[in-house]
Image (cartoon, rainbow, N blue to C red):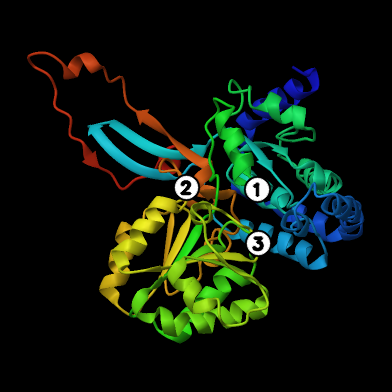
Amino acid sequence: MSTNILTKVKLARSASIPLASVPGAVKDRALAAMAAALDSNRETIISSNKKDLAAAEKLVEAGKLSKSLAKRLKVDDTKIDEMIAGIRDVIKFEDPVGKTLSALELDSGLELYQVSCPIGLIGVIFESRPDVVPQIMALCLKSGNATIFKGGSEAAYSNRTIFEVLVNAIESTEGMPAGAFALMETREEVNEMLKLDEYINLLIPRGSNEFVKYIQDNTRIPVLGHSSGICHVYVDREADMEKALDVCYDAKVQYPAVCNAMETLLVHKDIAGTFLPGIGKKYNEAGVELRCDERSFDILSGMGFLKAVLYATEDDWKTEYNDLILSIKIVDSLDEGIDHINKYGSHHTDAIITEDKNNAGRFIDLVDSSSVMWNASTRFSDGFRYGKGAEVGISTNKIHARGPVGMEGLLIYKYALIGNGHKVADYAGKNAKKYTHRKLNSNLSQKMARD
């Protein structure tokens, strides 16, 4: 293993200890410094990004990089404004570290506190989007976690410049430990990171389903994330047509190259003849290629669309396109729609369009996804839109954190037991003392307040 990699990781691991106890006010000053540094280094950041864009254009022409990934690379003043806004949103949150989650009296003078704390050292591996660096660095800093970053080679110049700008701002803030944030830049370093379960507590991969699956299959470090975003919108027989048209258009067209964009449209048979021609016309104007089951093909294929209307294959139902391509299927019932989603979906985000409250409730109860929408676009599944300031990723896991993950996914807890010479022996045997197990309203920070 490279000495340089191990040195960076060990340093970050060591820095994670003091970082966990940095006061909230100090962390907020470091975040403010990060935002100011991005603002004052716009020209440098955009100049570096132009190098990545020029290289990406050649890779697209050579067929080595998709247009959707290349599109995510661009950093301009608007994108920098968004980065700054995301950091400032994180500043507004109260310090999440050291919060008492529960308090229990075990017996008189023997009190148990469950307290939030950072996870420790987190490895973030991502493709394309350079704005991931400030998003995750802000959340990790606020939650007291040291972080190793590894971005894709297609964004190497942008990632390095943004990282250096942010780290210089952080380490110039009095009270912040050095070495808590590190950047790795080669593919070999990723493979080395995956072996470092002794030091790294959690991995967060962000990228294609093949990329995330590779990470999941090649490490013993716990992985938070999702391997694909196969999202559905089901248009119920009781749908409002205007709402359905607006939501289905937004879910596919507003930004198709992301994991929360719709990939399959399911339509109840009773309204398919009315709804599909209307939405088909809108998709045609937006340049969407449609891949249909037999019944929807019969409705749409004769409409003279500019883009292709094709028959869907079995693979289409389980494909994340990240492009202006959409699978369409007509279903006979709400339950058939739910079954299709649970069979082919990726448990990411799925929506129902209906005016029937009972149908909406059944959909929400039975669709096994991390986010379920009623009369709203799947594109809302996002940390910023969920009020988290930003997100570290979207998790389809059923442990620890699920859905768009903000700071709560970067925290765990510890137990603190405060006694006065209490012994377990006193609670065992013939004359054993009894536990009270009485809930308390106090919190540990007050209990431990220094004079």
Q: Nearer the viewer, residue 255 or 47?
A: 255
Q: Which element type, helix, strand or loop, lies under badge 3? A: loop
Q: Is residue 419 left or right of residue 251?
A: left
Q: Residue at x 68, y 74 (%)?
A: 287
* Kind of element beneath mark 2: loop
Neighbours of disc 2 within 10 Å: few (<14), some (14-19), many (20+): many
Which residue sits at x=85%, y=47%? 161
Q: Earlier in the sequence, mark 3 or mark 2?
A: 3
Query: Which badge, 1 or 2, comes first in the chain's sequence?
Result: 1
Give the labeled residue for mark 1: 136
Instruction: Return the x and y of residue 426 as percentages of the image width and height.
Output: 19, 17
Residue 232, percent across and down?
47, 63
In this view, the residue in front, 274 or 255, is: 274
| C-alpha span from label 1 to label 2 | 18 Å
- Helix, strand or loop under label 1: helix
From the viewer's side, name the closer residue of 42 and 95.
42
Identify the residue under disc 2: 396
Q: Does the rendering let one see residue 148?
A: yes
The disc at residue 323 is: 3
Label 1: few (<14), some (14–19) or many (≥20) C-alpha neighbours in 10 Å: many
Where residue 231 sits: x, y (%)? Answer: 50, 59
Q: CA distance from mark 3 to mark 2?
A: 22 Å
- Judged left or right of residue 441, residue 372 is right
Camera-near label (1 vs 2) is: 2
Q: From what the image shows, is residue 122 above or below residue 278?
A: above
Query: What amino acid is at disc 2?
Result: Thr
Left or right relative to 443: residue 6: right
Q: Residue at x 55, y 60 (%)?
A: 260
Mark 3 surroundings: few (<14), some (14-19) or many (≥20) residues within 10 A:
some
Residue 386 visible to an observer of this rendering: no
Task: Specify which label sits upstream in the sequence, 3 or 1.
Answer: 1
Residue 345, position as x, y percentages in the image: 45, 53
